[in-house]
Amino acid sequence: MQTLFEFTLPNGYLDEQGNLHRRGVMRRATALDEVEPLGDARVRANEAYLGIALLSRVLLSLGTISPVPPGVVERLFAADYLFLQEFYLQVNGGAPKQVFAERFSLIETECPACRARFTLDLGQLEDAPVG
């Protein structure tokens, strides 16, 4: 059975030194991976943080970064975060998209221009006008 899966992010993570990290490896999640983050103080304070905590547990590497700490997942571009959520579903048996959306629809993000932090409801993006 395959337990490790390679991926390439659409945009990539730009580290503090200006290095772009796009290729990585995710492992299949365990029951403990799904349960243990629920006890994390950051998740208890903001359940939207569950997606970040969970992904940081199953991401073995991202470019030269290994392991991948939550702080790196926090700073991913929204498109890369969404890509990893979808990839997680594929790797772990293809749970229905709406289940993942219910669990991970709110993300904390930061404006790259002004550095203002805000919560983004990804569930509302499907209904947003384009253009």
Image (tube, helix red, strand yellow):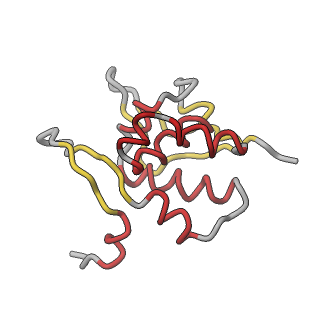
* Front position in the image: 42 or 1: 42
The answer to whether 31 appears left or right of 103 in the picture is right
* Front position in the image: 21 or 105: 105
The answer to whether 116 appears left or right of 82 in the picture is left
Question: x, y percentage for residue 58?
Answer: 62, 38
Q: Residue furthest right?
A: 1
Residue at the (69%, 53%) spot, across then down: 91
Residue at the (29%, 46%) spot, across then down: 109
Residue at the (48%, 65%) spot, across then down: 101
* Front position in the image: 102 or 6: 102
The picture quadrant where one finds residue 121 is bottom left
Question: x, y percentage for residue 4?
Answer: 74, 41
Residue 4 sits above or below residue 106 on the image: above
Question: x, y percentage for residue 128?
Answer: 27, 76
Name the quarter where the C terminus is drawn.
Answer: bottom left
* Front position in the image: 116 or 6: 116
Residue at the (43%, 42%) spot, across then down: 43
The answer to whether 83 appears left or right of 47 in the picture is right
Residue 96 sits above or below residue 104 on the image: below
Callout count: 0
Question: x, y percentage for residue 59?
Answer: 59, 36
Residue 3 sits above or below residue 69 on the image: below
Q: Residue furthest left?
A: 114
